[in-house]
Amino acid sequence: MNQLGVNSLLDKFFKLKENGTTIKTEIIAGLTTFLAMAYILAVNPSLLEIAGMDKGAVFVATVLAAIVGTLFMGLFANFPIALAPGMGLNAFFAFTVAGAWGIPWQTALSGVFVSGVVFMLLTASGIREKIVNMIPGVMKYSVSAGIGLFIAFLGLQNAKIIVPNEATAVGLGDLHNGAVLLAVFGIVLSIVLVTAKVNGGIFIGMVATAVIGMITGVISTPTAIVGAVPDVSSTFGQAIINLPNIFTWQMLVVILTFFFVDFFDTAGTLVAVATQAGLVNEKNEIPRAGRALFADAAATTVGAVFGTSTTTAYVESASGASVGGRTGLTAVVVAIMFGVSIFFSPLLSVITSAVTAPALVIVGIMMLGNVRHIEWTKFEIATPAFFTIIMMVLTYSIAEGIAIGFIFYPITMLVAKRGKEVHPLMYVLMVLFILYFAFILQ
C-alpha cells in the first residue's frame, strides 16, 4: 500500500479530518505525551521494588501494561489518552499495603486484579459512563483546572524548584543547583516557544532541555543504546495464583481503595483531557466515554497479571492534547514509543524530572484556563469549584480533591434552593465520599 493509501486509511479509522487534526500533529502529540510520562518507567520499578518485587520484572510489566492499555484506548475508544501504572497508587501499594500492613505483594496484585474486574463489570453495565456524564459542567471545569495546578506543582516539586520548608510547608529550591537551573531553563524556553506559537513547542522544549543537560553534564550521557529485556516471569500470573488470599477484611479495604482512587482519578483525567482537546459535546458529555473507561479497566486487569500496580489514564496526556492531539492515533504513537523503550531502556535515563517539568508546568497553565467557565460570582458554584481545585494540590491527591468538591456541591446547591438542578447520583456520591473519608481513608 502506498503512502497515500496509508494516510487515507488512518484518516478514515481515526477520523482525523473530522477532528481537525493531521497525522503529523498526532505524531508530535504522541511523542510529547510519551516524554511527559516516561518517568514512570524508572519510578514504578523503584517503588514496587520496595514491596519486594523484582525491579527488572516490574519494568517489563510497566511497559506491557502501558502498551496494552494505551492501544486499547487509541484503537477502541479513539481518545488521545495514554495509560500506565498510576503514581500514588503504586506508592500506596508499596508503602501501605506491602509495607505498613505486611500484605505480600503477590496478594496485593490480586487485589489490583479484582478491582480491575469490578471496573470492567461496572463499565459494561454503563454505570461508570453515566457517573462521568452526570458530573455538572462547573465540576468538570474545576477538575480540569485542579489537575492543571496539581501537575504543575508536581513538575516544580520533582525538579526541586519547589521544596519542603519547615516554616512555611513549601519554599523555593536551590537556584544554584545545576539540575534546578536546567529545569528553570526548560520552563523559560518552553514558555517562549509556546508563546511564539511554535508547533510542538512543548516537545521541542523538552528535547532541548535534555540536550543541554547532557552537554553541561547535569544529565548523564547514556552508556549504552540497547539493553537486554529483563525477565518478567517472577511477577507474571501472580495476581491469578494468589486470588484465594483476598478473602479478608483487610484485603476488602485494599480493593476498595484501589477501586475508589482509580475510578475518580481516571474520571478526572478523562474529563480534563477531553476538555483540553475540545472533545466535550454541546450536551456537556464526553462521546465514547464508556469505551475510554473500559480501556482503563482492561488495562488495570491486564497490568495486574503482568505484575504491576493499578494502570490508569495519565493526566500528562493533556500535554499531547495541548499540541493538537485529538484522536486515538496519538495514543497509538505513545504505545509504539513504550514498545520501543523496552529495548532502548538506557536512553530513558535522560528523561529526568528537569526534562519533564517544562511540559507539566506549561500544561498546568493551559488547563487552569478552564476556570473562566466557572460562575465565580455565584457562591454556591464558586465554593465547590474552589475546594476541588485547591484540595487537589493541598492533599496531593486528584481523587481526594474531587471527593471534597463533590461533597460541597450538593450542599451549597441545596442551601441556595437549587437542589433540583443536582443529578440524584451526585447526592449518592456525596454520601459515598463522606463514608470514604470516615471509614476507608487512613
Image (spheres, grey):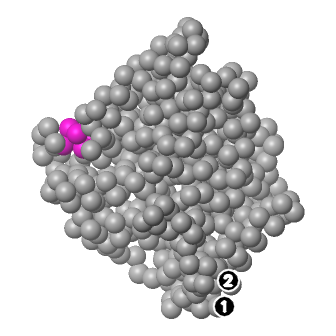
Marks 2 and 1 close (CB-CB < 8 Å): yes
Classify residue 16 by image quadrant.
top right
Q: Residue at x 45, y 64 (%)?
A: 167
Residue 380 x/y as whole percent: 59, 22
- Up the image or down, 163 lies above or below 394; here it is below
Q: Quadrant of the N terminus?
A: bottom right
| Residue 130 is at least partly visible in this image | no
Q: Which residues are magenta?
A: 251-255
The numbered disc on residue 143 is: none
Residue 176 x/y as whole percent: 60, 84
Classify residue 60 by image quadrant.
bottom left
Q: Quadrant of the C terminus?
A: top left
Q: Secondary structure at mark 2?
A: helix
From the image, give the main secondary structure of the stretch colored magenta: helix
Q: Residue at x 30, y 41 (%)?
A: 441
**Kind of residue at badge 1:** Ile
CA separation in Å, label 2 and label 1: 6 Å
**Kind of residue at badge 2:** Val
Categorize mark 2 by other alpha carbons within 10 Å: few (<14), some (14-19), many (20+): some
Residue 252: say if magenta: yes
Residue 423 x/y as whole percent: 52, 15
Categorize mark 1 by other alpha carbons within 10 Å: few (<14), some (14-19), many (20+): few
| Residue 45 is at least partly visible in this image | yes
- Up the image or down, 398 lies above or below 333; here it is above
Q: Residue at x 38, y 47 (%)?
A: 300
- Up the image or down, 312 lies above or below 283; here it is below
Residue 230 x/y as whole percent: 35, 75
Q: Residue at x 67, y 23 (%)?
A: 378
The residue carrying mark 2 is: 211
- Up the image or down, 374 lies above or below 297; here it is above
Q: Of all residues shown, which one is farthest toward the right?
A: 196
The residue carrying mark 1 is: 215
